[in-house]
Amino acid sequence: MSAVPLESSPENPLPVRTVARAIGSWVARLGRVWMEGQVTELARRPGMGTVFLTLRDPAAEVSLRVTCSRALCDTLGPQLDEGARVIVWARPEFHLARGALTLTAYDVRPIGVGELLLRLERLKSVLAAEGLFAAERKRRLPFLPHGIGLVTGRGSAASRDIQENAARRWPSVCFIVREVPVQGPAAAAAVSEAIRALDHDMSVEVIVIARGGGSVEDLLPFSDEHLLRVAAALTKPLVSAIGHEQDTPLLDLVADVRASTPTDAAKRLVPDLGEQVHHIGVLRRRAWRCVTHTVDRESALLVALRSRPVLADPARDVRRRSEEVVALRARSRRCVEQRIEAAQADLTRATSHVRAVSPAATLARGYALVQDQAGTLVRDSADVSVGQPLDVRLATGRLSVDVTRTMPAPLNPPAQPSQDQAGAREAAGRQGRTS
């Protein structure tokens, strides 16, 4: 829609009525439009057929005055009230007398909770797909934080509830409080800026966002996409304590810990001093019982060891072992002596037997062995000739002789040789064989 500029100059200025009519004509060209906003002011004056309301954009500090007929407003009933989100079909009008811009509503349609929840579900699906609700990104709260950053409304009951309950549990707890709007169009941006500042504060170890209960519309700032992304980017754990148990803004899903109430948040932030003292006492008693039980068990074991004979008279076992060693030595000595005596007896018998059958014994009794030059024993005089040299072996020494005469054996057979002669002959035969 194009606009024709008015011709004017410092020397030829236009009257106010002319400018006002031009503005009115320009505004009238817009026609009827559909708008979405939040009702911030609603005035029903008695006796008047017109209702005045202010429609504000929740995402910006922009508002417009809207008028509608009482009949149209009455048809909406309690749905049209301050804080309600509505869709308005209106026509802008510029009043020349007042120089004010207003919109005349011809149709007003409240946005129900179902529509708001549907929009939140869509945003929830998008953020869940990006992993902002994943359990693995949740961080554990510190056991005893030195500083707790608290973002809450100005003078709110939730702030007092958290601080009083936390101080009751742990008196030395320290809070760094940031009071910001927690309702309205500026709430999401203010809360985002507050938690970002606390995240950069080195004295803060955990951040808490707390607000009391309210309607779905009142808690909408805590489902704002910008606030959720700022909360997900924090480097410190975040606790969400928004509303009551049944209230579930999307910030509860992004936060590391979700507290059902501000009182529950205080219980999660700091431990209870009395419980910790009691727990320490229980652990000390348990440790004392363990130590005393161990000492008693070891003492009983020492008494049992000392009562044993080996510890009552340590030399007793040494003496017993010494006696066993002495007995074993005597036994081994007897065994060796018996073996030696038996071996000596066997040696004596063998020596006697060897001596009895030895040719040397026969020679010692006066016999001699006669051998020719080839070493063969001479048993018959017919086996030698006169002048043949012979070797005579005596018991001690040898003789070399020459045969001067041979004599044949008598015709009568010789008598049975004696045992000595038989032994000498047998020895001589063995000697001849070995030679």
Image: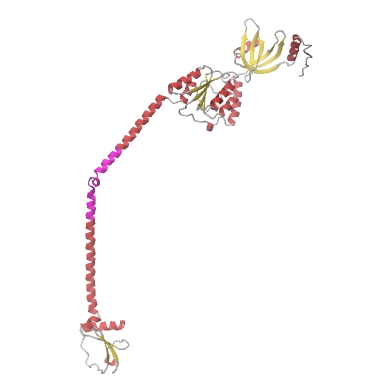
| Quarter of the image with the N terminus in it | top right
> Which sits in the foreground, 377 or 175?
175
Q: Position of residue 143 (x, y in %)?
A: 46, 29
Main secondary structure found in the magenta portion = helix
Q: Which residue appears at 32% of the width and 37% of the height?
A: 294
- Magenta-drawn segment: 296-324
Asked where in the image residue 93 lies, by quadrant, the reply is: top right
Residue 207 lies, with reference to residue 304, above or below; the image says above
Locate the C terminus and report the quarter of the image it occupies: bottom left
Name the quadrant containing residue 327: bottom left
Is residue 338 shown to the viewer in this render? yes
Q: Is residue 138 above or below residue 161?
A: below
- Residue at 35% x, 33% y is 287
Total numbered labels: 0
Residue 309 counted in the magenta span: yes
Q: Is residue 352 above or below residue 252?
A: below
Query: Residue 92, how many percent across, how many down?
Result: 70, 14
Q: Quadrant of residue 364?
A: bottom left
Q: Position of residue 142 (x, y in %)?
A: 47, 29
Q: Is residue 408 magenta?
A: no
Q: Residue furthest front?
A: 11
